[in-house]
Image: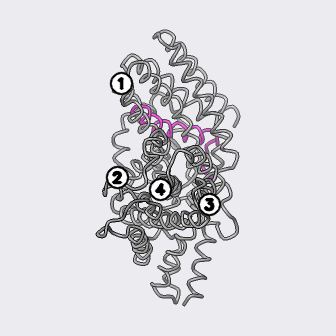
Amino acid sequence: MWNRVVILLRARLAARGAAETVPIATLFLHASVAAFLCGVVRDALSPYTYAAFALTISSGLVALPLLGEFGALLVHDEADSWVRALPISDLEQRLARALHVLIATLTQSASSLVIAALFAPSTFTPLDRLELVAQGLLLAATVAAALVWLQSLFASRATTLLVVLQTLLFGSVIVGAVVGVRFVTEFGELTAPTSPLVRAFPPALFAAPFEVHARAEDELPWPLVGWLFGALALGSLLVLPSVGADAPRRSRSWSSIVLTPLRVLALRSWVRRDERATFELVFEALAREREVVMRSYPLIGVPLAFLALGARGEEGPAKEGLAALLLFTSATYLPVLLAHVVVSRSHRARWILDTAPTPRAALQNGAFKALVARFVVPLYALLAVLTIVHGTLSSAALLVPVAFLLAVAVMRATWDFCVHDLPLSNPPETVEAKLNWGNVLIGSGVVLTILAVLAWRLVDRAWLAAVICAALLALELATDRRWRRADG
C-alpha cells in the first residue's frame, strides 16, 4: 500500500513543479520576516508571550498562501479522473493528499520557525527551542487543515462567501502582523493567558508548554489539548472529499451585473473598435475564473482594512494623511493582479486569440482597459467611500481622482514586466512570480509613498488637482497611442 501512496505523492508533487525544486524565494521571505519581527521583540517578551508571538507570525505566513492559490492547488486535483481509474483504494488517495498538504505546509513553516527558535530569548534552553519548532509545525498543520477544509467546502457551493471569508482572513493576517507589534510591550510580562477565552486563539493554545504559573488541580493539561486538536486536524485530512478541477462558471457574476453601466460607458468612450472583443472577453471571463478571483480579490481587503482600522482614534490631519497614503500605495498591489491576466481554466481556447485578425496591441489594450474597469475602478470607489467616512469630502474629491489615474499609469508601466502572454491563454499552474518582482514592488512602493506625502501636503486646491489629473490623462492617451504604434 505504501508504495502506491508514495507513487501518488510523487505524482502530486511533480504536477505542481515541486518534485525537483525547493521554494527558495518563499523560504527566504518567511525567514526574513520572522528574523525581523522576532529580533525586534525578543527582549521585550516573556518566554510565553514570545512563543505565542512567534507561533502567530509563523501561522500567519503559512495562512497567506493557503488563502490563495496554494490552498486551491492542494484541494483541486486536475488529474482526479485519471487517478480514480487507477487500481488504488480511496484510502490511498486520501493518504497521498494528506501527505502532500503536510509536506507543502511544513516546508514553508520550517524556515520561520527555525529562525524564531534561534532568535528566542536567552532563557530558552536548547530543548525549549526544539519544542517551539515542534509546536509551530503542529500549529501550521492544524491551520493548513482548517483552511483546506474551508476551501473544499465552499469552493463549489458558495464561491462568493469563500471570497468574502478569504478577504477578511487575508486582511486580518496582514493588518494584525503590522498593527499587533504596537501592543507587544503591553503583554510582554505575561507568563500565562489572563482568560480561558485567550486559549481560543490557536497560537496561545499551542504556546501552553511555555506557561509559568501555579497549576490548579482541576486545570486542563493544555499542552495535551493542543496536541489533541492537532491530531484531529491531521486526521480530518483523511476524510477530506476529493474535488476535481472547477470549470469556469457559465452564469454572470453579481459583480458583472453591478458593473454593467461602467462597462457600457467604457465601451462608448474609451475602448476602440478593434479592442472591444478582448475587452468584453476579459471583463466577463476573469470574474468566472476561480483562481483569478481567489488570488486577486482578497488582496483588496488589505488597503481597506488598513484604512478602516488605522483611522480609528485619529483626528484631523492624521486621518487625511493615512487616507492619502493608502490611496496612493494601493497601486503596488496591481502588478500582482496583472500577473494573473494570462491564466484561465479554458486556456486551450487560446487559439481564438492566436488566430484573431486583430493586432496584438489591440488585444493587450483591450485586456488592460477591462482590468481597469473590472478591478481598479471598484477598488478606488471603495477607498473613496472610506476616505469620505474617515476623512473629509473635500480631501476625497481632490485626492481620489489623482490616485486613481496614477494607479492606471502604474499598470501601464508594469504591464510588459508582469504580463508575459496573451490574456486567458495559460493554465493557472503556470502563473509567473519572478524573483526580481520584489525590487519593482519595493521601488514603486517607495515612490508612491513619497507621492502620497507630496499630494497630501500640496494638493489643497481644486485647480491644482485638475491640472494633475489632466497631465495624467494626457500620459494615458499618449501611452495608449504608443502601444498601438509599437504593434504597427
Looking at the image, is mark 3 or mark 1 nearer the viewer? 3
Mark 3 or mark 2: whose residue is earlier in sequence: 3
x and y percent of residue 347 in the render?
Answer: 56, 58
Where's the C terminus, which quadrant?
top right
Closer to viewer: mark 2 or mark 1: 2
Q: Which residue does the numbered mark 1 point to in the structure image? A: 388
Does residue 278 lie above or below 106 as drawn?
Answer: above
* Amino acid type assigned to the residue bearing label 3 in the image: Val
Q: Secondary structure at mark 3?
A: helix
Reply above or below: 1 against 145. Answer: below
Pointers 3 and 1 in contact (C-beta within 8 Å) = no
Instruction: Please give the range of residues in magenta.
Output: 353-382
Callout 4 secondary element: helix
Q: CA distance from mark 1 to mark 4?
A: 42 Å
| Count of numbered circles on the image | 4
In the image, what residue type sits under mark 2? Thr
Q: Is residue 36 above or below residue 206?
A: above
Compare residues 411 and 279 and report the one nearer the observer.
411
